[in-house]
Image (cartoon, helix red, strand yellow):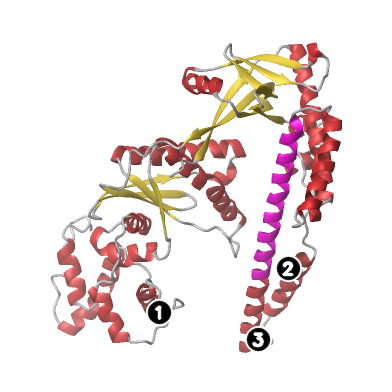
């Protein structure tokens, strides 16, 4: 099987002289000016770019290439600029499709709510607000269109409009990076950015004079980076990105060098068990099982408020947390099983939770998969349906753990091929109820019975299967049992210690079944 190509990125700090800084600023300014011109041309001809007419697309590409080469003075930066602009426009198109689908679903939900309220009471006061909301969503959907992007982030742009930052500060943030691909072509080296063994990086400028054509800037390499630095020196192709940042009031320059690495050999597989992972927007739970599907241990990793962090800080923090997942897998010497999650969000939560979900799907999942491949950990994706409910209804009585830990347990078992059959007591319950409960799933679905039992408990008012809550309910009906039997039942607290925790699960659940609580 062909190995997947992964990216390895190293960050070096540059130490330019005063004159080199001045020439670097020129590169930043010209590169980003050309990028904005190229994007504007591509955006204006977006219908041609997204069309299936190959000749028209080739003609557009040739036209943009000629214009950019003229502005760049035949510089190699043009290819990188064109590719970045095309990627940016495709991302906008994807956002447009998702937004349009989301707003259409909003309209359907609002119309259904209006119809339901009108069927009950046509004079309900809520109808006025719903009609106003319906009109607002329809107008926004009608006016929805692709708009040009704001280079330098909207936040900085708004700050500049308000006058909170100077024009120079805004330019530093807007034109904060430039990139170029270094590669070997036709036997000759054509590096816009090249790394040398003496810890020096060569950066191509926009000058044609021989003595001004390149900048040779030294950079620092720490002990941890030395291994990958030696790898870069032997690579024939890599991508270099130069960035400038204001840190503690000081302007600093950094070089990000990315290159392809092959997928590592798999060292941790599913031969002796698996690690199941259940993702939530503010924490993850891990369950370690053996090859027979028995729970051996579990672990929880919490996140802080990711929506309060800036982009780079958030990514570094999530990477740190995903390293803990990787270390857990290596410690247990097992492969990782995760849910094959789909994030086509058809509805909205509040703003804070939407942002947390976005951080999860964009950063955490992608980082975790790449880290597994780099460290030789086998990763397997399973169907996510009913993992939490199966854990809740089937294993709460055995383990008395949270639903999220039990969900990760079910995920791990599903990754090893175990099928979760419905317990006999639930089969008996469904036989008593008959076909009165009709869940949304089709009868051919493997989770049809689980859906039935879930709907039954939901309609019966039983919303939790945590042992402590069941104990509380049983103690509340103590007086009812006393009046029926005329005596104090001695086994109401059977299996409970003085602290209220369960010591003997068998006795406790045997009592639950005898009293026909379920």
Mark 3 or mark 2, whichever is nearer to me: 2
Residue at image x 59%, y 65%?
A: 346
Sooner in the amino-acid sequence: mark 3 or mark 1: 3
Residue at the spot of label 2: 137
Q: CA distance from mark 3 to mark 1?
A: 33 Å
Mark 3 or mark 1, whichever is nearer to me: 1
Q: Is 130 positioned to the left or the right of 499 in the image?
A: right
**Quadrant of the rendered structure where residue 463 is?**
bottom left
Q: Magenta residues, as a range?
A: 77-105
Which of 66/517 is in front? 66
Which of 507/311 is in front? 311
Do labels 3 and 2 touch, CB within 8 Å? no
Badge 2 density bin: few <14, some 14–19, many ≥20, Cα 10 Å: some
Badge 3 density bin: few <14, some 14–19, many ≥20, Cα 10 Å: some
Residue 78 painted magenta: yes
**At numbered mark 1, what does the secondary structure look like: helix, strand or loop?**
loop
Residue at the spot of label 1: 443
Q: Is 142 positioned to the left or the right of 510 in the image?
A: right
**At numbered mark 3, what does the secondary structure look like: helix, strand or loop?**
helix
In the image, residue 82 lies at what x, y percent? 75, 39
Sooner in the amino-acid sequence: mark 2 or mark 1: 2
Q: CA distance from mark 2 to mark 1?
A: 37 Å
């Amino acid at each position: 099987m062909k190995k997947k190509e992964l990216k390895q990125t190293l960050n070096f700090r540059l130490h330019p002289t005063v004159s080199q800084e001045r020439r670097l600023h020129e590169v930043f300014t010209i590169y980003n000016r050309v990028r904005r011109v190229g994007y504007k041309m591509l955006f204006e001809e977006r219908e041609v770019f997204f069309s299936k007419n190959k000749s028209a697309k080739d003609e557009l590409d040739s036209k943009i290439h000629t214009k950019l080469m003229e502005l760049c003075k035949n510089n190699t930066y043009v290819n990188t600029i064109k590719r970045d602009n095309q990627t940016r426009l495709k991302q906008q198109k994807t956002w447009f499709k998702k937004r349009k689908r989301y707003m259409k679903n909003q309209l359907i939900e609002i119309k259904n709510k209006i119809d339901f309220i009108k069927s009950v009471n046509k004079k309900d006061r809520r109808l006025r607000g719903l009609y106003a909301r319906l009109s607002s969503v329809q107008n926004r959907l009608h006016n929805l269109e692709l708009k040009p992007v704001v280079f330098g982030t909207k936040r900085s742009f708004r700050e500049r409009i308000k006058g909170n930052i100077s024009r120079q500060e805004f330019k530093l943030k807007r034109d904060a990076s430039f990139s170029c691909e270094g590669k070997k072509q036709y036997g000759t080296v054509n590096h816009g950015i090249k790394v040398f063994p003496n810890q020096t990086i060569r950066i191509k400028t926009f000058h044609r004079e021989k003595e001004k054509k390149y900048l040779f800037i030294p950079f620092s390499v720490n002990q941890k980076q030395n291994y990958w630095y030696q790898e870069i020196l032997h690579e024939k192709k890599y991508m270099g990105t130069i960035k400038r940042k204001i840190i503690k009031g000081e302007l600093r320059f950094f070089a990000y060098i990315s290159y392809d690495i092959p997928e590592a050999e798999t060292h941790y597989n599913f031969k002796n068990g698996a690690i199941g992972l259940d993702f939530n927007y503010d924490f993850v739970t891990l369950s370690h099982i053996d090859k027979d599907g028995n729970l051996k241990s579990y672990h929880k990793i919490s996140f802080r408020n990711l929506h309060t962090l800036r982009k780079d800080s958030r990514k570094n923090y999530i990477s740190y947390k995903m390293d803990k997942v990787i270390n857990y897998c290596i410690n247990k010497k097992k492969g990782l099983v995760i849910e094959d999650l789909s994030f086509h969000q058809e509805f909205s939560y509040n703003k804070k939770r939407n942002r947390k979900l976005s951080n999860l799907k964009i950063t955490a999942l992608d980082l975790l998969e790449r880290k597994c491949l780099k460290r030789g950990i086998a990763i397997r994706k399973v169907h996510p349906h009913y993992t939490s409910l199966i854990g809740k209804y089937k294993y709460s009585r055995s383990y008395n753990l949270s639903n999220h830990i039990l969900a990760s347990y079910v995920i791990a078992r599903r990754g090893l091929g175990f099928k979760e059959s419905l317990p006999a007591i639930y089969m008996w319950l469904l036989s008593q109820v008959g076909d009165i409960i009709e869940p949304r799933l089709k009868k051919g679905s493997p989770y049809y019975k689980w859906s039935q039992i879930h709907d039954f408990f939901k309609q019966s008012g039983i919303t939790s299967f945590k042992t402590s809550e069941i104990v509380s309910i049983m103690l509340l009906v103590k007086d009812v049992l006393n009046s029926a039997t005329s005596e104090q039942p001695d086994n109401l607290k059977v299996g409970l210690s003085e602290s209220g925790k369960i010591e003997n699960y068998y006795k406790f659940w045997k009592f639950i079944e005898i009293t026909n609580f379920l």
